[in-house]
Image: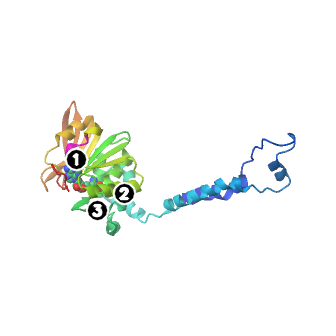
């Protein structure tokens, strides 16, 4: 609706309000400029040269309008998902709730599974990996307690969905995925949706991303059997780390805060994540 209004305004009124040009060479300085003479005479026909920029503007804006106007068939399903799976289960952070309402999860799953994108479950994304359950994405995002100013590291980009949610909540997001084809797909999905502040790297996240460290927050979406030392080192003082730890399928999600160089660990809930690859490229 709002889009229609924005378009209708300028397009409908523009030819009537074309600006009056300043003519620098008139023979008689007291005689009104040609434009004004024509207007006073009761007719006004702006020269084509003046309509050209308007024309070009409309042509350039048209594809943009088509993209913006593309209807999202999942708005209602997403709203229901947020209410029933996230709010009703106790997620309270209004920014997280808003982010979960905004990010189109269906754009991060294979085309043939789009109709299932807002169901209460993880879904396969290829290479034996999954996009996490929406509740888990919301819960882990809330545990990071982001304010919008942070630099965040994610290990396990997968589909890129969690990274998109983080981009709604923090300043910069760095994400590492060990399976190259997944990293490439996630990059593309994030790029298509305009998440320019997410950087995705193909590689082994067990070593973190030392070139971009330190991080205000780190989230790990695969499970190591202990907190990798590199991630401990790359977390800022006062920073938060949310990570599942343990041997599959008996893992615990931890909320960790770094205080005076030490990690203060709080267990949150039992979870089941894919194991974190410790060494090698994961190809
Ligand atoms: C549950 S999926 C991640 C879901 C993802 N966050 C999303 O929103 O779709 C876990 C991912 O961690 C990746 N992974 C496992 N070990 C890794 C490692 N050492 N470094 C980086 N990624 C790893 C897997 O390839 C998989 O894509």
Place of residue 120 in the rendered image (x, y in percent of width and height, measured from the top left): 28, 62
In the depicted view, which residue is nearer to us: 156 or 226? Answer: 156
- Judged from the image, the secondary structure of the residue bearing numbered disc 3 is loop
Report the span colored magenta: 204-209
Disc sitting over residue 237 in the figure: none
Place of residue 263 in the rendered image (x, y in percent of width and height, measured from the top left): 19, 36
Residue picked out by circle 2: 189
Instruction: Decide which of tag 2 and tag 3 comes sooner along the chain.
Output: 3
Q: Residues within 10 Å of mark 3 (few under 14, many from 20)?
A: some
Place of residue 40 in the rendered image (x, y in percent of width and height, measured from the top left): 85, 51
Foreground: disc 3 or disc 1: 1
Residue sitting at 71 percent across and 56 percent down?
48
Q: Is residue 43 left or right of residue 213?
A: right
- Judged from the image, the secondary structure of the residue bearing numbered disc 1 is helix
Quadrant in the rendering for residue 258: top left
Q: Is residue 20 left or right of residue 41?
A: left
Asked whether residue 48 is in view, the answer is yes
Q: Is residue 235 left or right of residue 33?
A: left
Disc sitting over residue 120 in the figure: 3
Instruction: Residue 208: say if magenta.
Output: yes
Ligand 1 lies under 8 Å from the Cβ of mark 1: yes
Foreground: disc 2 or disc 3: 2
Q: Residues within 10 Å of mark 2 (few under 14, many from 20)?
A: some
Q: Whole-Å distance between the Cαs marked 3 and 1?
A: 27 Å
Disc sitting over residue 205 in the figure: 1
In the depicted view, which residue is nearer to us: 50 or 76? Answer: 50
Q: Is residue 68 left or right of residue 87?
A: right
């Amino acid at each position: 609706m709002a889009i229609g209004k924005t378009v209708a305004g300028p397009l409908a009124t523009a030819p009537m309000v074309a600006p009056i040009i300043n003519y620098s060479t008139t023979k008689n300085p007291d005689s009104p400029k040609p434009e004004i003479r024509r207007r006073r005479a009761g007719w006004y026909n702006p020269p084509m040269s003046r309509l050209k920029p308007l024309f070009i503007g409309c042509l350039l804006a048209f594809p943009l309008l088509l993209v913006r106007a593309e209807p999202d068939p999942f708005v209602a399903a997403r709203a229901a998902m947020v209410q029933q799976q996230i709010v009703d289960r106790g997620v309270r952070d209004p920014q997280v709730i808003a982010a979960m309402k905004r990010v189109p999860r269906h754009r991060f799953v294979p085309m043939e599974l789009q109709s299932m994108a807002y169901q209460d479950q993880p879904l396969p994304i290829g290479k034996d990996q999954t996009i996490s359950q929406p509740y888990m994405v919301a819960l882990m995002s809330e545990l990071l307690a982001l304010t919008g100013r942070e630099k965040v590291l994610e290990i396990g980009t997968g589909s890129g969905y969690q990274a998109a949610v983080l981009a709604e909540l923090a300043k910069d997001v760095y994400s590492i995925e060990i399976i190259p084809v997944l990293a490439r797909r996630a990059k593309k999905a994030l790029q298509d949706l305009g998440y320019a502040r997410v950087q995705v790297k193909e590689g082994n996240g067990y070593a973190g991303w030392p070139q971009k460290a330190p991080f205000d927050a780190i989230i790990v979406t695969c499970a190591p059997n202990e907190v990798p030392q590199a991630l401990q080192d790359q977390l800022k003082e006062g920073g938060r780390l949310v990570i599942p730890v343990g041997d599959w399928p008996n893992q615990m999600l931890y909320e960790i805060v770094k205080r005076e160089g030490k990690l203060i660990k709080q267990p949150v809930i039992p979870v089941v994540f894919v194991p974190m690859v410790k060494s090698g490229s994961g190809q």
